[in-house]
Amino acid sequence: MDLPQRIVDVTRVTLIPEPLPPPPEPERQPPAKPQPQARIDQVAPLVPVPQPNRPALDPTPLPIPSLDPPRFVPLPLPDPRPLADPVRVGPRFATPASALRPPYPDAKRRLGEETMLRLRLSIDARGRVVAVDPVGAADPVFLASARRHLLARWRYQPATEDGRAIASTTVITLRFELEE
């Protein structure tokens, strides 16, 4: 198959460089004003300042240093007794025996599961348990049951420092065991 040949007219482009802009004119500065020259029309009179009447050297002789050994004055020794640390007493359990056991979760009772939880209790200055956090791994169902019960029922005599009630923490071990 023969294809017709096309003749394409070629357009030639010649680039003409753009003329460069003229260099900027230097800034014209206003002519410098002549600086006024200082002139002294009058000489300021010197005012004498009266000086106190003092001898040039102190005529008092200097003391002669003593050849005796210097006197040693001992400083008082610090009290050898150690400073007393504040007297701290930890929280004391005050929950009646009838309110000790948290309810056993029904789902765990049906499955026959038992567990042991280590819990950190935060106790406020009134002796109330205000936070229950697990120490180590804990089953969430047992933890939720224990947390609800301890926050609602458990009470402590608060910890004291120098006889003043303070907030404290303690770690307990709580066992969930099925009775047989």
Image: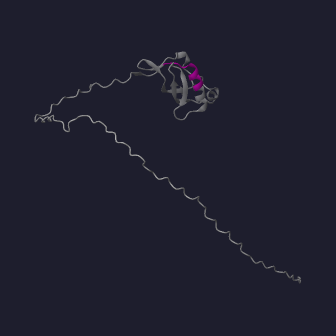
In the rendered image, residue 173, in percent from the top left (x then y), is placed at 50, 27
Q: Is residue 112 above or below residue 13?
A: above
Residue drawn at x 67%, y 69% is 22
Quadrant housing residue 140: top right
Q: Is residue 22 above or below residue 60?
A: below
Determine if the magenta segment contains residue 154: yes
Color scheme of the displayed model: one colour
Q: Can residue 112 be spotted in the picture?
A: no
Q: Is residue 27 above or below residue 171?
A: below
Residues 37 and 66: in front is: 37
Determine if the magenta segment contains residue 77: no
Q: Main secondary structure of the magenta part?
A: helix
Q: Is residue 66 left or right of residue 54?
A: left
In the rendered image, residue 45, in percent from the top left (x then y), is placed at 36, 42
Give the quadrant of the N terminus: bottom right
Residues 166 and 133: in front is: 166
Q: Which residues are magenta?
A: 147-157
